[in-house]
Image (cartoon, rainbow, N blue to C red):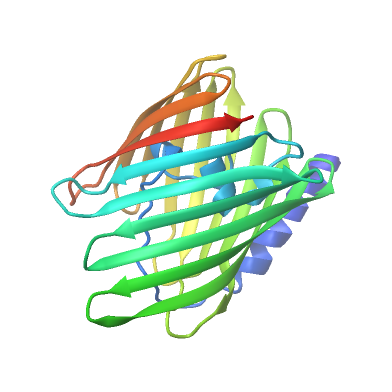
Amino acid sequence: MIHIKKMMCVCTVIFAVISRISPVYGAFEYIGLGWPAATANIKTVGQHPHQFVVNPALMEENQATRIVLSYQKPFQSLDLQAGSLTLQNSFKQTPYIHHLEYFGDEHYSELKLINGSVWSVANGYRVGVTLNYHHLSVAGIKSQNALSLSLSSHAEISGQLKVGSVMEHAIRWGRALSLPQKFHVGGEYVVGPVTLLIGLEKESVLPLETCLGLQVSSRSLWQIGLGYRALSGMMSAGWRIHTRKITLNYVFVLHPHLPVSHGFGLEMVLP
């Protein structure tokens, strides 16, 4: 019965937010940054700070402080650069996530600042919220800024099955820069060392996109990730080597019509 209640809670969030999706246009957002890109950038489920940035409901109480640095060379042979700094911490048993991200070149750039937190609603069910600031700069055009509020949820149906949902930019401020509303829903199923992931994304005027991910992990040292996004045809893969205090990862993203992207990440657990 409690499993049915959790599913009903998640479905309530899904139907409430999907009704708010409207045809709006916004800035281009690069999706190849960070370890989740290895598994098709599915951010509604998982246990990585870059997933917490979109869905802070994934965080649990008293998680260790972590700093994550990421660098990506989007689309080799172009002059674009991408990078981020992420801090995960807890204050009075409440987890928080803070994220600064850059994408662009000398002519075009995006800067994002995201802060989020989580609240436990029931056993195994959590909701999260993020406050997002976006800055868009284009050569020869006045820079534009916008604020938005995103809502998320996460439910542990069983020890093997988990589901999550996110409504990005559910509430927006700033008419000059229109941020695209995007709805995510996804699930993960764990079978021994293998984690299967599936995500559905609906952004404004774009068709529904199906995202598939596969992650294979050892008990203590390494992870391998594979991903595929059906609408764009993007494929990705990566490896992650982790110790108790330091983790390194490499990810590449292959777009059918653009050059390949390469990225590296460093994670540190404090103290």
In the current view of this chain or complex, which residue is farthest to the front?
271
| Residue 192 visible in the snapshot | yes
Q: Where does residue 118 sit, x and y in percent of width and height?
A: 72, 51
* Front residue of this view, candidates 41 and 104: 104
Horizontal side of 45 relative to 101 (left or right) equals right
Quadrant containing the C terminus in the rendered view: top right
- Residue 93 point in image, percent of width and height: 80, 43
Above or below, 25 relative to 101: below
Work out which quarter of the rendered image holds the N terminus and state it: top right
Whole-percent x and y of residue 218? 51, 15
The answer to which image quadrant residue 130 occupies is bottom right
Check the image and report above or below for 146 versus 150: below
Q: Position of residue 247 (x, y in %)?
A: 48, 26
- Name the residue located 49 percent from the left edge and 33 percent from the top edge: 267
Q: Residue at x 57, y 14 (%)?
A: 219
At horizontal 40% and vertical 29% (from top left) the residue drawn is 249
The residue at the far left in this view is: 77
The residue at the point 63 percent across, 48 percent down is 164
Left or right: where does residue 188 sit relative to residue 25?
right
